Amino acid sequence: MAIAVVSGKGGAGKTSFSASLVLSRRGVTAVDADVEEPNLALLLGNPPMATMNATIPTPQVVDDLCARCGTCSRTCRFGAVFSFGQAPPVFNSLCHGCGACVLACPRGALYQVDRPVGVIGRGVAGDAILVEGRLLVGNPNPVPVIHRAIEVGLAEGRDAVIDSPPGAACPMMAAVREADAVILVTEPTPFGRADAEVAAQVLVELGKPTALVVNRSGILEEDPPLGGILGTLPELARISFSRRVAEGYAVGVPPSAVNPSWAMAAESAWRWVMEVTG
Amino acid sequence: MNPLEIAVVSGKGGTGKTTVSSALAAALKGDCVLCDADVNVPDLWILLRPRILEREDFMGQEKAEMRRHLCEGCGRCAAACRFDAIWLEDGEVRLDRRRCEGCGACAVVCPTGAISLSPSIQGDVFRSETDLGPFWHARLHPGGENSGRLVQLLRDRARKTGRELGKRWVLVDGPPGVACPAASAITGCQLALAVTEPSRSGLHDLRRLGELASRLRVPMAVVLNRSDLSEEGAQAVRRACDEMGWPLLAEIPFDQEIARDLAMARIPSAPLAKAIQAIKEGMEDLLGEDAVEEGE
């Protein structure tokens, strides 16, 4: 079983809640799929990790076969192939690894090799296994690294917690693709609400069972109500803002170690996931 | 003359980009154009209460489209697709446009011309007026591509507005992360203003952002938000700034008043007054006419 933790807005508490979920169960796999900014390891004791590359196929040219016809650069829809005059084509980091140029080349002059775009780390954090995806800075597309991290994490064959990237675009969609249930962490501010609504729309459309955890409750005397689509989702827990939690987080102490309401929220989340996944 | 473009970015989400952007815009009132480049989950509108003057469709990446009557079910398209967007089911080709990256490999291999690529509307682009000045923003349809192209489009429009109206600054409220949208928000700016927090993750992500900015040859300066949450963390950020040559323009202590203002959708200008003044002065030092002369 796999649970994804998402938020819409960044900094709402995804990683804190993911760590709490991991620490409240024995023997789960923690997958850090926020590959642009992987931070889950920092809350799980920063264990040493064995690494391997996450790659995408990238084109290469066989000079002698290339007729300089320019079909490859006309075929590429990502601006990743340049060909001018008598020079062989040049490929840049905008390449999505789709292979369209290779398929289109009339002389069969192109082939593909694996190019690293990220690093997958695997470490042991207590009784949990941590699998981390990390985009190499300078590569525009995090999605292949997200898919690879999740694939490696799920191959461990344990229940998995997937710490997802913020937003509600393709990186988040990639992170929830294999999830059986999704926890949406939000905060009772206009920003948290607006961003969580966007994420909730996507999740409902994808048919993912989704429940809410409200973090930093009590900024105002009374939390404003969560209307609209958020009002239709089950609310598992409301966690008050705590300066001690924030201070602990800063130095890598997971919130559930400082404040019991995080551990309790994680417990109710696991119970809910068991219910909806049967 | 082109306005000076400042991208407010962070790496890690939730460090206070929109907070700093809005208060900085209030301090530059009358002399800046605003642009929300966090097109996936835009938030600046909540504080700016824009009056929308114009709306247009944003046409996203083209995606594959089937002409069923031409399809013979050979499945070459499914074999060519690297994104699991096309597959064969009971001899019939199935296409999921949400997974389609629009590469066109399927159309290249289709022997009967049954697949073409067609554009799709991926969101709305807005030109608005606010109390703080002109504002370009957008809304992507949920689940759509997180488009660097849309970020570029907004920035082009904002720059043009700035030039036409003779504004000195364009303020870009950026997305989190270091991938395509963040790179699009930073590329070509005169300054990346990184908002961070004194946590290990804040610093970790700040370093990745610094690497991106340096690859894009954009100078970076830092604002340390919630600076008193961890003295150890704050020291680490100060040391990193020193080491990497990132000017640390301001430190903002944790303040319930800021959180309350934001929860009520108000720009926290009063509690941020001192910090914003320091950021403004820092920007002038780095980018103002004196700085340019010294540079020459």
Image (cartoon, rainbow, N blue to C red):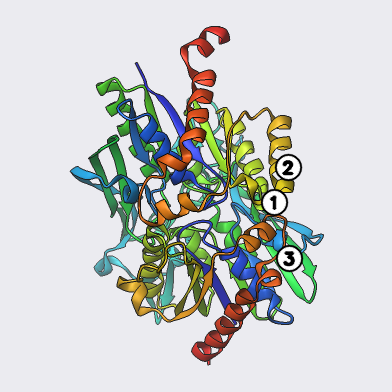
Residue found at x 41% / y 60%: A189
Q: Which residue is mark 1?
A: B200
Q: Chain of mark 1?
A: B
**Mark 1 in CB contact with mark 2 (< 8 angstroms):** yes
Q: Identify the amino acid type marked 3.
A: Leu
Residue at figure coordinates x 36%, y 22% from the top left: B168
Residue beneath disc 2: B236
Which picture quadrant has residue A119?
bottom right
Quadrant position of the N terminus of chain A in the picture? bottom right
Q: Chain of mark 3?
A: A
Pointer 2 indicates a residue of which chain? Answer: B
Q: Position of residue B250 (x, y in %)?
A: 57, 34
Amino acid tagged 1:
Arg
Q: Position of residue B122 (x, y in %)?
A: 31, 54
Q: How far separated are the C-alphas under marks 1 and 2?
A: 8 Å
Q: Nearer the viewer, residue A192 or A200?
A: A192
Q: Could you tell me which secondary element the residue under label 2 belongs to?
A: helix
